[in-house]
Image (cartoon, helix red, strand yellow):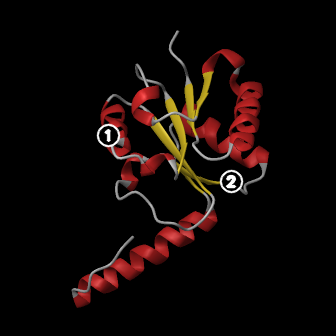
Amino acid sequence: MKEYIFIVENENITFRKGFKDLLEVKFGKDYIVSTKDSLQDTLRGEPKLIILTQEALKEVKAMDKIKTLYEYGTKFILIKENDNGFPFELNMFNGFLSKRMPTKEMTEAIENVLLHGTIYVHPDIGAYILSKYNRFVNVLKTKEKVRL
């Protein structure tokens, strides 16, 4: 059977291990794969869900791999811990979670994205996206350059 959920987290081994253990309790041990390797080297097949941190998006070819898997129906959740930008292809993500979310809220959001196809945006991240969007709209009016 194909792996159900991939966790790609390059920086914090403690977070990655704890997060994997948490998801194994929720979804079952056989369906979770956790890695610190690059997105390109790790992902084979078409997992149902990929959970990644913003650090994993810094890889040169990460967005190319995400676009390919997105076309095959893979869902994506981005876990953020700070306000260091977003990928431009926001539409490819089914969820934006915060590392500071309560465990129950985080696992419920992941379950809803995975099993019910819902979209979840943590309120803090939603406020950040909305502020950047509003700034972008204002910039369009003035033709000034902006960085999301």
Amino acid type of the residue tagged 2 in the rendering: Lys
State left or right for residue 128 relative to residue 28.
left
From the top left corner, tell me how far across and down residue 16 is, in percent: 68, 38
Residue 6 position by quadrant: top right
From the top left corner, tell me how far across and down residue 106 is, in percent: 70, 46
Name the residue at the top extreme.
1
**91 versus 38 height, above or below:** below
Residue assigned mark 1:
67
Residue at x-position 73% and y-position 34%: 17
Residue 23 position by quadrant: top right
The Cα–Cα distance between marks 1 and 2, rounded to whole angstroms, is 24 Å
Q: Quadrant of the C terminus?
A: bottom left
State left or right for residue 62 relative to residue 114.
left
From the top left corner, tell me how far across and down residue 117 is, in percent: 50, 37
Count neighbours of disc 1 (C-alpha within 10 A) and say few if under 14, some if 14 to 19, many if 20 or more: few
Q: Of callouts 1 and 2, which one flags the residue occurring earlier in the amino acid sequence?
A: 1
State left or right for residue 129 relative to residue 60.
right
Label 2, secondary structure: give it: loop
Observer-nearest of 7 and 135: 7
Residue assigned mark 2:
99
Amino acid type of the residue tagged 1 in the rendering: Lys
**8 versus 46 height, above or below:** below
Residue at x-position 51% and y-position 66%: 84
**92 versus 23 height, above or below:** below
